[in-house]
Amino acid sequence: MDSPYRDTWEKLNQEIITCQQCPRLVAWREEVARTKRRAYRDWDYWGKPVPGFGDPQARLLIVGLAPGAHGSNRTGRMFTGDSSGDTLFAALYRAGFANQPTATEREDDLVLHNTFITAVGRCAPPKNRPTAQELANCRPFLSRELSLLPTVRVVLALGHVAFKGYLRALEERGLDVPRLKFGHNMQYDFASPLPTLMVSYHPSRQNTQTGRLTQAMFDTVFQQIQALL
Ligand code: SF4
């Protein structure tokens, strides 16, 4: 990213956590944190934008949609504490990208191997649907993460919104991105040094419960990524 200063993780994450650019999302994330879900009434919800996390030398970057209202909006760590995360971390563990199959809170001793996890939206959106403007507001954060992750060789986009958002981020970085089709287990190779893009259906409860995304389908994606790495 063109920048008058040298970016750092500390600076970026501080800006993310204190961001108030999207009034609708600020109101929603805070309201959810105040009202809570009954099962989590003893939790002190995070209720702020959620930064990415993982290995800063990662070769695999996973891009999701946005925090779940009672998932990472509660725990403060991407994909941590909801059913999407349950599916994702179990698959990462099976594939050797995580030291444990579960993620429940920020201090749960989870370690990602060679992997960094982020999302195109940082604030929990109502009905899991950020607006185009909200995603545009948030995209510079993804772009800065891309700059801070020079060793990434594979980007895995989870779901259509993440897929589109990542491609838009590349365009906004001045890259000429061809028209690409979204689909499960698709692989797109770009000219070096751009990472290969892998695409998966999002591990949402809706997709896993309906069988749109099975464990075998998800594992296949990570096996393919292992082969690429
Ligand atoms: S979605 Fe992104 S840009 Fe909007 S308030 Fe949250 S962190 Fe800021």
Image: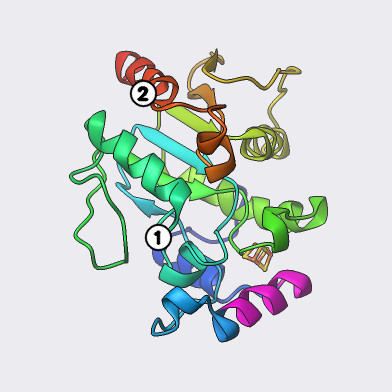
Q: What residue is disc 2 on?
A: 219
| Amino acid beneath label 2 | Asp
Q: Residues within 10 Å of mark 2 (few under 14, many from 20)?
A: some
Q: Can residue 82 be seen from the camera position used here?
A: yes
Q: Crowdedness of circle 1 by 10 Å Cα count: few (<14), some, many (20+)? A: many
Q: Is residue 143 left or right of residue 133?
A: left
Q: Is the CB of the residue bearing disc 2 within 8 angstroms of ligand 1?
A: no
- Judging from the image, what secondary structure is the residue with disc 2 in? helix
Residues 173 and 27: in front is 27
User: Magenta stretch mostly in which secondary structure?
Assistant: helix
**Residues drawn in magenta:** 21-32
Question: Which residue type does callout 1 highlight?
Answer: Gly
Question: Residue beneath label 1, please?
Answer: 81
Secondary element at tag 1: loop
Q: Quadrant of the C terminus?
A: top left
Left or right, 167 with reference to 42: right
Would you identify the image quadrant in which residue 40 lies? bottom left
Residue drawn at 54 percent across, 50 percent down: 144
Image position, residue 120 (x, y; %) = 61, 48
Spatial separation of the CA atoms under disc 2 and disc 1: 21 Å
**Percent position (x, y) of residue 61?**
43, 37
Query: Does mark 1 have its CB less than 8 Å from ligand 1?
Result: no
Quadrant containing ligand 1 reads: bottom right
Residue drawn at 54 percent across, 79 percent down: 36
Q: Residue at x 62, y 39 (%)?
A: 162
Mark closest to the chain's N terminus, 2 or 1: 1
